[in-house]
Image: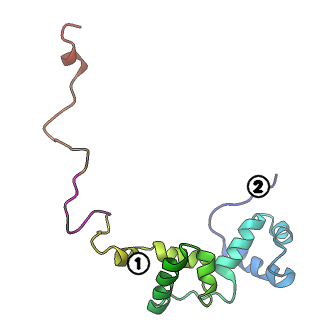
Amino acid sequence: MVNHRRGPWSQHEDAWLVSLVHRNGPHNWVRISQEIQTRSPKQCRERFHQNLKPTLNHEPISPEEGELIERLVHEMGKRWAEIARRLKGRSDNAVKNWWNGGQNRRKRNPDRLDDGTQGSQSVQSSYSYHPLSRPMDRREEHPGQ
């Protein structure tokens, strides 16, 4: 079994992947992976389609695109690939990341603070902490032992 690298791609790997896709086409991922040697076919395919494809739009998602994403999620659910196809130059991962991102999450739930607590309501935990209490020592539990 071939050991494939994990983690971030180097600029050299990115350039090499783009070159191999240009030469072999964006379909023969097994062959491309064999030439790169350090990445699996799936890693190569995902890196290209999610990050390196020349037609991808890397600008922040516009307010208009955000409204469209919200409408499409309401209509069809979280089908990111289908939603991305309806946006020009956006990958499914970019759409999903925008949806799950903090700015959009706060917009959908304005009462929730960044730390996950409710802003306008006090939320009590089922676990209460009493700084003056201490756990009982086993010797106190059974004196004389």
Please identify the residue farthest to the front as the structure is shown: 75
User: Who is closer to the viewer here, 96 or 1?
Assistant: 96
Q: Position of residue 54 (x, y in %)?
A: 69, 88
Label 2 SS: loop
Q: Quadrant of residue 83?
A: bottom right
**Magenta span:** 116-124
Q: What amino acid is found at the position of numbered circle 2 in the picture?
A: Asn
Residue 3: give its label. 2
Q: Main secondary structure of the magenta part?
A: loop
Looking at the image, residue 76 sits to the left or right of residue 53; the answer is: left
Q: Position of residue 43 (x, y in %)?
A: 71, 67
Residue 104: give its label. 1
Q: Is any atom of residue 90 visible in this view?
A: yes
Label 2 crowd bin: few (<14), some (14–19), many (20+), radius 10 Å = few
Q: Position of residue 130 (x, y in %)?
A: 16, 41
Q: Is any atom of residue 91 visible in this view?
A: no
Q: What amino acid is found at the position of numbered circle 1 in the picture?
A: Asn
Please identify the residue farthest to the left as the structure is shown: 132
Of the residues under marks 2 and 1, which one precedes in the sequence?
2
